Amino acid sequence: MEPSRIIARREFSPIEGGRTPAVEVLAPVQDAETGDWMCAITFARLESNERTERVWGVDSLQALLLALKRMADIARRRKLRWLDNDHPGTHEICSHD
């Protein structure tokens, strides 16, 4: 698979130590062998190293939506905040029923 380009980026409110965690969402790319789609999300300045996760779907939209949900889950678990909110700012698209 070819490398993908960044299609979205969010910086969260600073956390202990002055670090400002950020997440980048890369455009979904299709696997030539399986036909499935992969969307990568990269967290920077969350820990000592960058952390990249790959999320798979049967089409590009599913891969993107699942990647956004995974990003929201990680941000919520880490108690990351966005702007003056007490949440990561993804509740509009990633509801948790």
Image: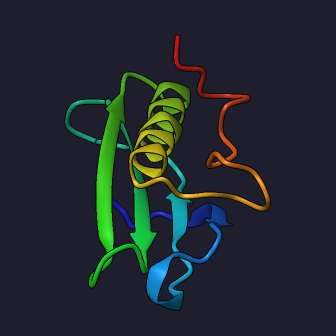
Front residue of this view, candidates 86 and 27: 86
Furthest residue in direction top, as rendered: 97
Residue 75 x/y as whole percent: 48, 51
Residue 13: image x %, image y %?
A: 65, 70
User: Is residue 91 found left or right of 1 in the rendered image?
Assistant: right
* 23 in relation to 57, above or below: below
Is residue 17 depicted above or below 21 in this figure?
Answer: below
Count of labels in the image: 0
Examine the rendered structure and indicate whether residue 33 appears above or below residue 58: below
Residue 25 x, y percent position in the rendering: 53, 57
Which quadrant of the structure image shows residue 3?
A: bottom left
Residue drawn at the location 45% of the way across and 89% of the way down = 17
Q: Residue furthest right?
A: 84
Nearest to the observer: residue 91 or residue 26: 91
Apparent side of residue 33 relative to residue 41 in the rendered image (left or right): left
Query: Of all residues shown, which one is farthest toward the left?
Result: 33
Say which residue appears at 69% left-offset and 45% top-offset: 89
Q: Position of residue 49 (x, y in %)?
A: 27, 82
